[in-house]
Image: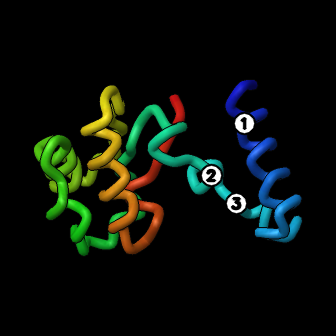
């Protein structure tokens, strides 16, 4: 329930600011409204991986877990528990060409 309220509040803010139309708001995935400050996890979605792996080259803290998941084509989510992890996750999400392979999530 709390996640839905946060998502609704974010959509209403975007609509009020004129940053998106109601049609666009209907198609926005909750993960697009999250960032390093609000997300509790960064997730790798194997089904959306196109294989470029540019984001993986910048991984350090999460490298081994993400490399293993990508090799096995297995999705996974990793908890963000400190600022260093959030900083790295922010870079990985920004580098993902698909904007669907490495995403933010609230769990």
Above-or-below relation of 96 to 40:
below
The image shows residue 19 at horizontal and vertical percentages of 77, 69
Measuring 31% from the left and 35% from the top, which residue is drawn there?
83
Element type where label 1 sits in the image: helix
Q: Residue 33, labelled with which disc?
A: 2
Q: State the residue in front, 58 or 51.
A: 58
C-alpha distance separating marks 3 and 2: 8 Å
Callout 1 crowding tier (Cα within 10 Å): few <14, some 14–19, many ≥20: some
The image shows residue 100 at horizontal and vertical percentages of 46, 62
Marks 3 & 1, CB-CB < 8 Å contact = no
Q: Residue 6, labelled with which disc?
A: 1
**Label whose residue precedes the other's in the sequence (3 or 1):** 1
Marks 2 & 1, CB-CB < 8 Å contact = yes
Measuring 39% from the left and 53% from the top, which residue is drawn there?
45
Marks 3 & 2, CB-CB < 8 Å contact = yes
Residue position for label 3: 28
**What is the quadrant of residue 2 in the picture?**
top right
Q: Residue 64, labelled with which disc?
A: none
| Quarter of the figure with the N terminus | top right
Q: Closer to the observer: label 3 or label 2?
A: 2
**Label whose residue precedes the other's in the sequence (2 or 1):** 1
**What is the quadrant of residue 85 in the picture?**
top left
The image shows residue 41 at horizontal and vertical percentages of 41, 36
**What is the quadrant of residue 27 in the picture?**
bottom right
Measuring 62% from the left and 51% from the top, which residue is drawn there?
33
């Amino acid at each position: 329930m709390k996640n839905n309220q946060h998502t609704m509040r974010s959509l209403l803010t975007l609509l009020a600011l004129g940053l998106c139309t109601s049609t666009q708001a209907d198609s926005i995935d909750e993960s697009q409204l999250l960032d390093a400050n609000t997300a509790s996890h960064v997730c790798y979605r194997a089904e959306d991986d196109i294989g470029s792996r540019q984001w993986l080259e910048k991984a350090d803290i999460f490298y081994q877990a993400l490399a293993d998941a990508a090799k096995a084509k297995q999705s996974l989510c990793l908890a963000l528990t400190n600022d260093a992890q959030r900083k790295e996750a922010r870079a990985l999400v920004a580098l993902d060409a698909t904007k669907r392979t490495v995403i933010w999530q609230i769990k």
